[in-house]
Every structure is written in C-alpha cells, then in structure tokens.
Image (cartoon, rainbow, N blue to C red):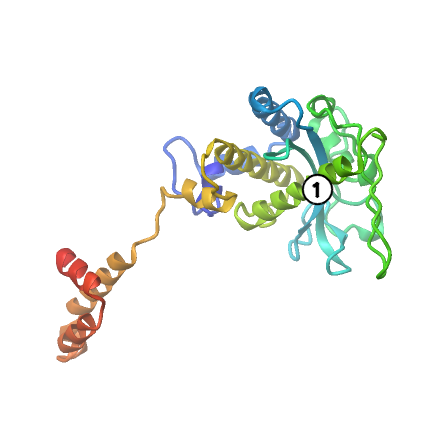
Amino acid sequence: MIKARFARKSLYRCQRAKNFTAKTGRNVLNDGRINWQKLVCLAAVKLISVLKPVIDRRRRLALIVDDTLMARSCSKKTELLAKVYDHDKHEFLTGYRGLTVGWSDGNTFLPVNFALMSTKKKDNMIGNQPVTADQRSIAGRRRTQAQRPRKFIIVTAAAFMMSEACMNVWLPPKRGSKGKYLVLATTQYKLHPQEIIQLYGRRWQIETYFKAAKQYLALNKSQIRSYDGQCGYIAVTALTYDLLAWQERQSIDDRTLGDLFYLMNEALPDLAFEEALVYLLTALKEAKAEISATVEQILDNFIKLLPVFMQKQLLRTA
C-alpha cells in the first residue's frame, strides 16, 4: 500500500505483487480490528527513540496538535460523513476534520497520532450512522471518538511521554481588525518571549505535513466508504510520510520532501524526451505508406530543425 502511494496510483491500478492483491489491501484497510492509531504511534516512538540520542539536549521537543479539512463532495452514504466548517472558505462542506498530533525537534516532524472527526449533531450528519458502538471493540471506540468534541480528544500517554514541552498550551486567538495584536499564552511562565515565539513557530511544521500529505500522498483523495477503511488510509499516509521524513533526516543535501517523493518513485520513471521522440518518429515512418508519400520529406526536414545533440542522439538510437 505504501508502494502504491509513491506510484501515485490506487491499489487497483498499482503493479500487482506475487503474494498481494488489491482485494487483500482493501480487506486490510477495512478491518475494524486493526488499531491504526496505535500502529502510527508505535512507529513514531521507534523513530523518535533513534533520533533522540543525536538531538542537542538544549533543543526543546514539542507536540503539535492541529486539524485539517478532509473534504468529500460525493459519496453521501459514506459512514459518519458530516457537514464541517471550512475556515478558509468560511462555509460548510461535506467531509471530516482530520485531527493530528505531531512531534517535532525543530528539524523533523513526525505524525504521532490522529483521529478522523465527524459530528454528533444530527442536523450536521449526512452519511450513514456508525455500524457499531460497542466500546469493547476497537472499531466501536474509534467511532465514539469521532463524535466527541475535538477539544476533549486526549493524546495517548505514550505520545505525552515523548515530549519535554507537552505542558505548553498555545492559545492563539483569531486575528482581528488592523491595529490589534496577536496573543501567545503558555503555562510555562519561565520561558522568555523569544523562546515562546520560537516554539510557536514550530507549529508551521504540521501545516507543512498537511500540504505534503495532500499534494504528494493523496491524503484527501480516499474513495473508501467505511470509516475503518478511511482510518487505515490515513495511517498508511502517515507511515509513508515517516519514510520521507526519515530519508530527509539522513540526507546530507537540502532536498525537500517533494524531491524525496519523486526520488522514491524512480522505480517508475517517465520516458526521456529523446526516447519518446524516437518512438514517435518510428511510428510515423511505419505508417508513412498509408498516410502520404511526402511523410519522409517532412520527417527529414523536422529532424534538420532539431538541435545538433538531438540529431546525434536520434541517429544513434534509430
């Protein structure tokens, strides 16, 4: 499934594996017994445990909490689909709110936990009701969590233990009219103003995660209708992002996550321009008898107009 993300294809369009089918992938994603949130958390814990020994002790570690709109304009029967408010467009759209907890050392951002939030208000509910509410099962607890107010969602204890700055609470009010100022408040009253601003600046990393996950990893492109399947889809996206973040940490140059995404996708390269041109010219030459007697002259004139290095390349590959 991670390979399909790098190939930018669905499970059905991705290259088939010997011991893995698209149906198997779909069944795994839709399995309500799998604790996807715990899987993402455990992966983050492992990566952080490897990174911590090489992080300067003076550097503050932080947990960042934010949500993003997961819009779905169709599939009205999708489980727990709801009306959610888009703060950018200032209107209600159909979809979910993707609540994410991330860890950062100021250099690397790792998604630690997530929750796909719906609504409890009947007037805002569009999709089907949850298929189970049994609190003895992972699926039931996951759906109950989705209908709680976002401010009451508690980060798991394991995630809290990974951050020295977990007691910091940021309260950034909305920007008002011109002339008003923005307030940053924290429970860590011993911090200097410069340190508070520096720590709050790390919040932008979660916005970078949302952008990269949507632009490269198709975070908001899921067509899965079951709630369990959508949670699995988000978990696979988070794990794929972990690979990119780890590769970025290991790199000695300044390659961006976008560069690394395409680097990981080199197993499926596009045709070089010269190769595509050779295929085109060969196809035209084969069809010249059926098209026109003047095709040969047209092709020769076209080749003469190309740069010299392309002419040489075409002569070698012809």
Position of 120 with respect to 98 (left or right) is: right
Q: Residues within 10 Å of mark 1 (few under 14, many from 20)?
A: few
Asked if residue 131 shows in the view, the reply is no
Which quadrant of the figure has residue 144? Answer: top right
In front here: 211 or 193? 193
| Spot occupied by residue 312 in the image (x, y as percentages of width and height) | 16, 60
User: In the rendered image, which residue does mark 1 sit on?
Assistant: 201
| Spot occupied by residue 294 in the image (x, y as percentages of width and height) | 14, 80
Q: Is mark 1 on a helix, strand or loop?
A: helix
For the C terminus, the quadrant is: bottom left
In front here: 83 or 204? 204
The amino acid type, in three-letter code, at marker 1 is Gly
Asked if residue 62 shows in the view, the reply is yes
| Spot occupied by residue 93 in the image (x, y as percentages of width and height) | 73, 57
Q: Look at 12% across and 79% down and name the residue there.
A: 293
Which quadrant of the figure has residue 265? Answer: top left
Is residue 72 shown above or below 39?
A: below
Q: Look at 18% across and 58% down and name the residue there.
A: 313
Which quadrant of the figure has residue 148? Answer: top right
In front here: 279 or 108? 108
| Spot occupied by residue 78 in the image (x, y as percentages of width and height) | 67, 48
Is residue 284 shown above or below 55?
A: below
- Number of labelled discs? 1
